[in-house]
Image (cartoon, rainbow, N blue to C red):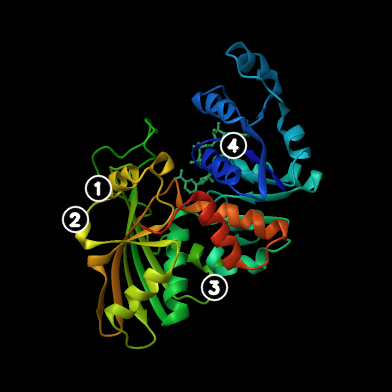
Amino acid sequence: MIKVAVNGYGTIGKRVADAVAAQPDMKVIGVSKTKPSHEAFVAKSRGYPLYIADISRKAAFEKVGLPVSGNVEEMLKAADIVVDATPGGVGEKNKPIYQKLGIKAIWQGGEEHEVAGFSFNSDCNYKDAIGKQFARVVSCNTTGLCRVIKAIDDKIGVAKVTAVMVRRGADPHVVKKGPIDAVVLDPTTIPSHHGPDVNTVLPHINIVTMAMIVPTTQMHMHAIQMELKKETTREEALAVMKAHSRIGLVQSSTGIKSTAELKEYVMDLGRPRSDLWENGVFEASVAVVGKNLYFFQAIHQEADVVIENVDAIRAMAGEVTDPEVSIRMTNESLGFVAI
Ligand code: NAD
């Protein structure tokens, strides 16, 4: 069993912990919190030992009935690998302790590529992660881009990608962020950071990205154009997407034409936290004009990176060397088939 610690049990950390707990070859040995928030009570109910960043706050946890197993360093000492899901920029500050203890660590997309020196996506570079001490799972948007670009590039060939990202303003539980009534260019300059971030994983891809933030919490939406290296048909492009276990085709017959309806569908399917781990490509939008492929895809920001973290753990632990095997184990243990 690979012993996994989750440092930062928030939006991403709590999902990673549950996904790890569902794996036959992994065990959650502890999760860390800074405050006795509702998530700490959920960790207790799941049976995850609770550790705290600042041990002087132990009494505040114990006063509300949350037993504390120790501080973060003690948690790290009990683990083979740590998934750092602290807020962007905080993870970098944890690097010295991971180095001191010689523990393997995985950071999230809120950190710079340089923190780990290696950025990960299961489809693109699983084998390069085998045995590595440090990795960074790229952000939700970059993960969604990498998956579909790699699939089309492998089967058809991609000459250039242009992608516009319409980003959610905040996660659903976040009450202090906006925008409430504006479309915000983020950044105002072009390209946005997403294209260079794709290049940390797929350096050969010619890509330009643009991004804006809108008043929604549900999901991101990407409008993607790919200039292909050869002529193709809509059917061939759809077949590539259908064959991918982490690309879900949102079928026209469902009548779904928005992120809200897609999230409702995923909730009705009974997915935990209504998580959509796959890219949600809108089937009706897939179009081929000449050598250009166009489509819309929805990306559930809280979910798509979770399964990538699980594969990164497995690759870095070094037991499973075939990416297909890890991806299948991850998918099957969560019980999902592409929508
Ligand atoms: P979050 O704020 O929801 O959760 C972070 C958790 O870490 C909180 O529980 C916080 O209490 C805890 N924490 C803060 N400082 C800590 C410390 N010093 N030690 C231990 N725990 C600490 O953040 P999130 O949305 O889960 O983001 C985590 C990372 O994942 C970031 O790098 C972010 O960019 C990335 N990410 C987020 C999303 C998303 O949509 N939320 C998607 C992909 C990647």
Instruction: Give the CA distance from mark 1 to mark 4.
Output: 30 Å
Instruction: Give the CA distance from mark 4 to mark 2.
Output: 38 Å
Left or right, residue 299 beside residue 8: left
The amino acid pointed to by label 2 is: Gly
Q: Earlier in the sequence, mark 3 or mark 2?
A: 3
Frontmost of labels 4 and 3 is: 4
Q: Earlier in the sequence, mark 1 or mark 2?
A: 2
Q: Position of residue 157 (x, y in %)?
A: 43, 82
Q: Secondary structure at mark 1?
A: helix
Q: Residue furthest bottom?
A: 230
Left or right, residue 297 beside residue 87: left
Q: Earlier in the sequence, mark 4 or mark 3?
A: 4
Q: Tag 1: Cα neighbours inside 10 Å, few (<14), some, or many (≥20)?
A: some
Instruction: Give the CA distance from mark 4 to mark 3.
Output: 30 Å
Residue nearer the viewer, 177 or 32: 32
Q: Secondary structure at mark 2?
A: loop
Q: Position of residue 97 (x, y in %)?
A: 75, 41
- Residue drawn at x 41%, y 46% as measured from the top left: 275
Instruction: Give the CA distance from mark 1 to mark 2.
Output: 9 Å
Among the 4 quarters of the image, the one containing residue 5:
top right
Q: Tag 2: Cα neighbours inside 10 Å, few (<14), some, or many (≥20)?
A: few
- The residue that label 3 is drawn on is 203
- Residue drawn at x 72%, y 60% as measured from the top left: 319
The amino acid pointed to by label 1 is: Glu
Frontmost of labels 3 and 2 is: 2
The amino acid pointed to by label 4 is: Gly
Label at residue 261: 1
- The residue that label 4 is drawn on is 8
Instruction: Give the CA distance from mark 3 to mark 2.
Output: 37 Å
